[in-house]
Image (cartoon, rainbow, N blue to C red):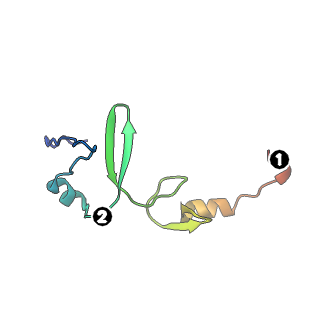
Amino acid sequence: MNNTGITRPVDNLGRVVIPIEIRNQLGIKEKDKILFLTEGTNIILRKYQQECVFCGKQKGIIEFKGQKICKKCYQEIKGVSINEEEMP
């Protein structure tokens, strides 16, 4: 992680402005979605991109039964046979 040295205050509604330099560097435009992640006491912001629900891959995404899934995981699922008698 790089320390930019830039700080911004949190306003009374909990909002924080992402500096224009960082938005330009990361290609974040108005109306883009930002994903909030936490790791210990850290808050990590990431530009939201669709990703596979199984492996997190962000390229080659398709929709399968209402879920985003990469083509590789889709192929793995297609190759799995299920014995319904063993299912709970």
The front one of 45 and 13 is 13
Q: Is 36 displayed left or right of 15 in the figure?
A: right
Q: Residue at x 35, y 59 (%)?
A: 33
Three-letter code, disc 2: Lys
Q: Is residue 36 above or below residue 65?
A: above
Q: Which mark is residue 86?
A: 1
SS type, badge 2:
loop
Q: Assess disc 2: are there few (<14), some (14-19) or many (≥20) residues with their C-alpha within 10 Å of its C-alpha.
A: few
Q: Which mark is residue 58?
A: none
Q: Residue at x 30, y 64 (%)?
A: 31
Q: Residue furthest top?
A: 41
The front one of 27 and 58 is 27
Three-letter code, disc 1: Glu
SS type, badge 1:
helix
- Which circle, 1 or 2, is nearer the viewer? 2
Q: Which residue is mark 2?
A: 31
